[in-house]
Image: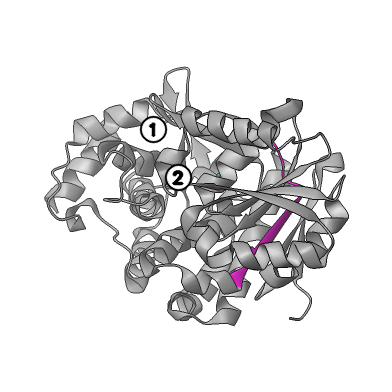
Amino acid sequence: MSDPARQRVSLGTRSYDILVGDGLLAAAGQHIAPVLRAPRVIIVTDANVAALHLAALERSLADAHVDYDAVVLPPGEQTKDFAHLEKLIARLLDMKVERGTTLVALGGGVIGDLTGFAAAVVLRGIDFVQVPTTLLAQVDSSVGGKTGINTTHGKNLVGSFHQPRLVLADTGVLSSLPRRQLLAGYAEVVKYGAIDRPEFFTWLEGHGMALIDGDTRARQHAVIESCAAKAEIVAADERETGRRALLNLGHTFGHALEAETGYTDELLHGEAVAIGMVMAFDLSARLNLCPPEDAARLRRHLAAVGLTTSLQQMQGRIWNPRTLVAHMARDKKVSGGRTTFVLARGIGQAFLSDAVDPVDVEALFTDSLAA
Ligand code: GLY
């Protein structure tokens, strides 16, 4: 393959590169070897990803003279809990993990978040590398160092900021993703355009469908552009004391929908974010902050690629506006009793607001269910 695209995440001594390329997995070993403290890695993956991609990663590590072991976990969101973290750490200790050993997270967001958190705490912290295999993980969760697990109180409530040493995104592996997963990841791609990259949003309007349908160059461009957008925000505000919260566009509404559907396959995270972004723009328009045409433009594009854009489209589910607002009040972005919303003045002009009246949010839910 040709040289991968390289995007730096600038965080002083914790800076690292994101490499993006088609077919990168076959050359992973040669890119991983230079960032290792010792030539030994432990790959953490799930059974579905292992069947598709583990052998290629292992081969490339062997070619680069890196020793490896692998831990294969069950697939699914339920793996991201205390019980599996404990089991994973026990396996790592059984395998005689050392301070110089590097973990390699091969998989989607669940594997990346869990492995990153294990790396943050085992032996008081060891290095890890992200090899994301879903679109959502390539453009969002593998970059920026958020790691963690879910608890019975909610998603991602226990974790740590622990930056990877390298992110290696092989856009070729996206062809093995089910279309529904790809579309859900695409919502996070659109998010970057909607936050502060209006030209990228326009590009997506022209190329998004081709990207979904398998255009490799379009996929690469979208992953590179998304990683550049995320790298810039993370470099400016690693610990989310301000600007990084813009990355939560659509998530406050989305998390309420996910809480209501029990974080099940009924509504994937990216699908909830797509509906949530439309609601955030609709709310902005209702509050006269954003031209209604921009809210309509966002909805139109998400719908054009095949994403659900309203609660009403979800067959067989009865929503209660008051319950949804109550879920929002439990969001982890609540501070001093106020929920921080990401609103917009237009496509590419997102901003944070803690001045939203819950009455307006409930009215939005009620009206959109009645429409
Ligand atoms: N996924 C949002 C963030 O990394 O901040």
Residue 276 against residue 64 in the figure, above or below: above
Q: Is mark 2 within 8 Å of ligand 1?
A: no
Quarter location, residue 318: top left
Query: Looking at numbered disc 2 in the image, what kind of residue is underneath it?
Result: Leu
**Colour convention of the picture:** one colour
**Residue 348 in view, yes or no:** no
Residue 57 against residue 283 in the figure, above or below: below
Query: Looking at numbered disc 1 in the image, what kind of residue is underneath it?
Result: Val
Is the residue under label 2 in contact with that under label 1 (CB below 8 Å)? yes
Q: Residue at (65%, 63%) from the top-left corner?
A: 169
Would residue 355 appear left or right of 116 to someone viewing this image? left
Q: Which residue is mark 2?
A: 343
Quarter location, residue 260: top left
Range covered by the magenta-colored residues: 162-171
Residue 308 against residue 82 in the figure, above or below: below
Q: Residues within 10 Å of mark 1 (few under 14, many from 20)?
A: some
Look at the image and tell me in which quarter the C terminus lies: bottom left
Where residue 142 sits in the image (x, y, percent)? 62, 50
- Residue that sits furthest to the front in the current view: 94
Numbered tag placed on residue 257 in the rendering: none
Q: Which residue is mark 1?
A: 356
Q: Earlier in the sequence, mark 1 or mark 2?
A: 2
Look at the image and tell me in which quarter the N terminus lies: bottom right
Q: Nearer the viewer, residue 127 or 40?
A: 40
Per the image, label 1 sits on a secondary structure element best described as loop
